[in-house]
Image (tube, rainbow, N blue to C red):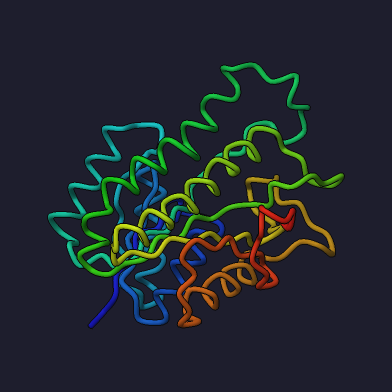
Amino acid sequence: MTKKVFITGANKGIGKEIAYQMGKNGWTVLIGARDESRGIAAADELKAKGIDATYVNVDLQSHETITAAANTIKSQHADLTMLINNAGIPGDMRKPGYEFTVDELRPVVETNVFGTFDLTQQLLPVLEANSGRILNMTIPIGMSDFFNPFAYKTSKAALNAMTQSFAQNFMQAGKAVEIFGIMPGGVTTDLNDNMTGDFMKTVPEAGKLITDIIFDGINHNGEIINFNGKVADYNNGLF
């Protein structure tokens, strides 16, 4: 039976590459994007490569589109087996945290935390019915002299906490759902103005790394996994 995945922010970058990697492994991919023309174009590009792809409109800053996307999936794709929360915005990645205004911080948190929570919660009944999985794309949140984007890190810290809290809830309630996070490390994308360097990965490299973890056959419930395969241990300061 063909498996089906919904990937947010899949019209470009890592999201589209994950869609491609999963699609060529036989998955049907639902391309989540807020821009209809870009979402349709991405789905068409994947179809041209022989992948079963469909566009689903979703804007993580809009509860209405999140609900509409969830309703579409419930009615037309009730066999969904995986949700990949990839979409996110970084905010100003160079400004010190103490210089941010609340209005600058709010859209990053609304997108990366509240929007992701809303979508996950609404799709949870479908995923549970199919013994599904939830993957949250994330970043390291420890102190670093080289990587300290305040708004982005703040939002992803909340997302990591949500991932682990949900995982514990699922285990305690006996829900047939798995939730985990992956930190792909530095990747050259639009999000970082296509930064390059020895420490940066290409989008295809990152997509392969991520899908290798997805397909490894291991239950990763509650884990935040670094690109090198190590699991973050926040209790012992290992990020």
As drawn, is 135 to the left or to the right of 3?
right
Q: Position of residue 181 (x, y in %)?
A: 53, 59
Q: Position of residue 183 (x, y in %)?
A: 62, 59
As drawn, is 154 to the left or to the right of 48?
right
- From this view, report whether residue 180 is shown above or below residue 104: below
Count of all numbered marks drawn on residues in the image = 0
Q: Position of residue 217 (x, y in %)?
A: 45, 82
- Name the quadrant of the C terminus: bottom right
What residue occupies the far front of the structure in this picture?
172
Residue depicted at x 69% and y 60%: 185
Q: Position of residue 119 (x, y in %)?
A: 33, 45
Residue depicted at x 72% and y 38%: 149
- Name the quadrant of the N terminus: bottom left
Residue depicted at x 54% and y 75%: 213
- From this view, report whether residue 142 is shown above or below residue 45: above
As drawn, is 68 to the left or to the right of 102?
left
Instruction: Judge by depth and name the residue closer to the eye, 155 or 68.
Output: 155
Instruction: Judge by depth and name the residue closer to the eye, 68 or 148.
Output: 148
Residue depicted at x 17% and y 62%: 78
Res 117 quadrant in image: top left
